[in-house]
Image (cartoon, rainbow, N blue to C red):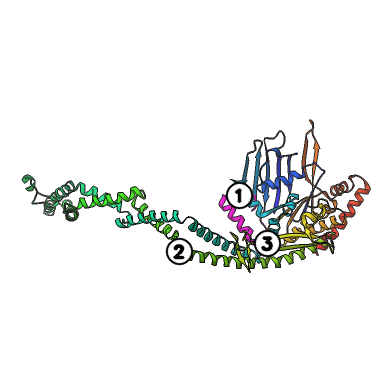
């Protein structure tokens, strides 16, 4: 939930803060006091587009800070929050809360911070979106659109729709992929055939050489070695002669010289015959030296034996190196790259087969994918129709308690066929439909204001007050499966009064039993049901400027504020008496809800 909100330099608000409790909180105040800025601040925390015009005159920047807690939210939401915090490097505060900050400078630049780390506004929006849902008059207008109504129905159905929609969308993606591939092969057959010839020519060249992984590097090293063969053999031979002697050295003076093994043997023999114990202790070390030098001699002998004796070996390697360089000039920078090109070429070659057999096989695959997609579309439509009946009944029941007892909401789920075999269409139960990203269904909310009236689309049948009540009824019904911990309603009761306002207050109080509910309202009947009452005050400053702040009302101040909202006379005895009576009625209703 949203535990605390701080606002600086936003609109008419210079500096304001409020601690928010669970349950039902209302925010009231005179027109122009700055209630809209409070909602704007929540939109900013939700990642909405920053508007430099909202920065208070004379301020360099506007800052909104929210402290959120995740106690009581669904397990899936906690997991989502944990993933967002971990991926962004954000940290929880010492009390387990998370601080979210949005800053808008006068030049229009925006900054977002989450848990002490700078993050993109989209990441901030993901975090707050999991915990906070803002419903305003613009949201009502959005729900008049067909796609929003379909989304509301799917949201109400929940797990009855989600897996079916996932399977439908997966099948649609496969069908679209195969359809695109068939269209490409059919319309670009000549171009694809030329591409296939080029790929096959390259593969034939590579297969003829048959390069091995890393072969170019190993051949280059071997060529360098063979190019210096004489000097390598001479160095090894001379070293071997110095260690163990060699009878084939041309220099007779060197041939007669004693080698390292002989000299070490004489040294060891001299020490072993000495009477001094100190010299005798050195003899074993000479034996180790003789063994080590003997090993060196054996390794040098093995190296000499391994040197190529075939004078044509270098020529063979140079020819092989030339063949490999021909491939690396044409296909990749090295042999490993050539092999990767060949692998990709074989995959591409298999995918652009334009033979009659391949096209027939692909056409059959497209048809099969279309039938599978049609099956998923049928199941999705059936599930939506079942959910539509339940949603219609639930919302109509809420309308009965909102002084619209004779009104009925009808949720229509229909399909519109197209001409047979239309491009991009599939056959579903002997009719043809264009499969959209969310199915073949058209969802529409229709309202019958009284018995006998023909249900009409909301945009054509509902007045402003009726629309507000329909949307609130929808939100109350949908909130039953909503995972967000906090819900904000911005004047969702606009155009409503009298008994309907009392019912709105009652339903918001009921909703607050499971959610944190924050409501911006002008209706005293709604405000009376709140557990916490915040008011936005404005004061005139020298120079004609206005400064607004937010304060929490105690019992006496709350009576005065409700009296002001009722009659515009917060200090009159009559107004206060009416306010006290309204609070008493609301308190009885809240106690009944809690029972």
Q: Is residue 315 left or right of residue 177?
A: left
Give residue 114's position: percent from left, percent from top. Answer: 62, 48
Give residue 315's position: percent from left, percent from top. Answer: 20, 50
Front tag of 3 and 2: 2
- How would you rate the neighbour count of disc 2 (Cα within 10 Å): few for under 14, some for 14-19, many for 20 or more? few
In this view, the residue in front, 135 or 288, is 135
- Residue 394 shows in the view: yes
Q: Is residue 98 left or right of residue 447?
A: left
Q: CA distance from mark 3 to mark 2?
A: 35 Å
For marks 1 and 2, the one nearer the N-term is 1
Look at mark 1 in the image and give the residue it sits on: 123
Residue segment shown in magenta: 70-98
Is the Cβ of the residue at disc 1 closer than 8 Å to that at disc 3?
no
- How would you rate the neighbour count of disc 3 (Cα within 10 Å): few for under 14, some for 14-19, many for 20 or more? few
For marks 1 and 3, the one nearer the N-term is 1
Q: Vertically, is 18 above or below 339? A: above
Look at mark 2 in the image and give the residue it sits on: 356
- Residue 72 shows in the view: no
- Element under label 3? loop
State the mark number for residue 416. 3
Give residue 192's position: percent from left, percent from top. Answer: 44, 55
Front tag of 1 and 2: 2
Give residue 403's position: percent from left, percent from top. Answer: 85, 59
């Amino acid at each position: 939930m949203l535990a605390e909100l701080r606002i600086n330099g936003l609109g008419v608000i210079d500096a304001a803060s409020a601690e928010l409790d669970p349950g039902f909180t209302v925010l009231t105040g005179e027109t122009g006091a700055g209630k809209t800025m409070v909602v704007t601040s929540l939109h900013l925390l939700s990642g909405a587009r920053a508007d430099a015009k909202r920065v208070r005159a004379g301020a360099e920047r506007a800052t909104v800070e929210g402290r959120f807690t995740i106690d009581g939210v669904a397990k899936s939401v906690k997991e989502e929050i944990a993933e967002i915090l971990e991926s962004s490097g954000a940290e929880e505060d010492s009390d387990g809360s998370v601080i979210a900050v949005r800053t808008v400078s006068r030049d229009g630049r925006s900054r977002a911070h989450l848990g002490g780390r700078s993050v993109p506004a989209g990441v901030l929006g993901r975090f707050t979106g999991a915990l906070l849902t803002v419903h305003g008059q613009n949201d009502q207008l959005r729900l008049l659109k067909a796609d929003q109504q379909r989304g509301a129905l799917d949201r109400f159905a929940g797990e009855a729709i989600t897996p079916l929609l996932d399977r439908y969308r997966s099948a649609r993606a496969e069908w679209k992929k195969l359809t695109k591939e068939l269209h490409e092969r059919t319309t670009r057959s000549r171009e694809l055939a030329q591409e296939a010839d080029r790929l096959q020519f390259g593969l034939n060249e590579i297969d003829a050489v048959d390069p091995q992984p890393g072969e170019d590097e190993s051949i280059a090293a071997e060529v360098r070695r063979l190019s210096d063969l004489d000097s390598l053999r001479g160095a090894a031979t001379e070293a071997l002669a110095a260690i163990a002697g060699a009878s084939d050295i041309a220099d007779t003076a060197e041939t007669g010289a004693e080698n390292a093994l002989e000299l070490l043997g004489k040294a060891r023999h001299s020490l072993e015959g000495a009477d001094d114990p100190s010299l005798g202790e050195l003899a074993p070390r000479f034996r180790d030296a003789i063994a080590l030098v003997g090993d060196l001699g054996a390794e040098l002998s093995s190296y000499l034996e391994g040197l190529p004796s075939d004078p044509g070996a270098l020529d063979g390697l140079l020819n092989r190196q030339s063949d490999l360089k021909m491939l690396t000039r044409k296909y990749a920078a090295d042999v490993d790259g050539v092999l990767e090109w060949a692998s990709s070429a074989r995959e591409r070659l298999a995918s652009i087969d334009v033979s009659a057999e391949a096209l027939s096989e692909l056409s059959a695959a497209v048809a099969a994918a279309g039938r599978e997609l049609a099956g998923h579309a049928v199941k999705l439509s059936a599930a939506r129709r079942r959910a539509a009946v339940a949603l219609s009944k639930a919302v109509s029941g809420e309308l009965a308690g909102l002084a619209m007892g004779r009104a009925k909401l009808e949720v229509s789920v229909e399909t519109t066929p197209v001409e047979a075999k239309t491009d991009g269409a599939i056959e579903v139960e002997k009719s043809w439909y264009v499969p959209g990203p969310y199915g073949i269904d058209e969802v529409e909310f229709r309202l019958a204001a009284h018995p006998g009236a023909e249900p009409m689309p909301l945009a054509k049948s509902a007045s402003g007050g009726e629309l507000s009540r329909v949307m609130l009824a929808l939100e109350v019904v949908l909130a039953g499966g909503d995972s967000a911990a906090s819900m904000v309603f911005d004047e969702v009761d606009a155009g409503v009064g009298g008994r309907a306002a009392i019912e709105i207050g009652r339903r918001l109080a009921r909703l607050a039993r499971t959610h944190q509910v924050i409501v911006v309202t002008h209706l005293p009947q709604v405000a009376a049901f709140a557990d916490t009452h915040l008011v936005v005050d404005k004061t005139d400053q020298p120079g004609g400027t206005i400064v607004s702040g937010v304060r929490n009302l105690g019992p006496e101040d709350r009576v005065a504020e409700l009296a002001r909202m009722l009659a515009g006379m917060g200090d009159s005895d009559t107004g206060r008496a009416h306010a006290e009576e309204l609070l008493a009625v609301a308190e009885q209703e809240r106690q009944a809800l809690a029972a």
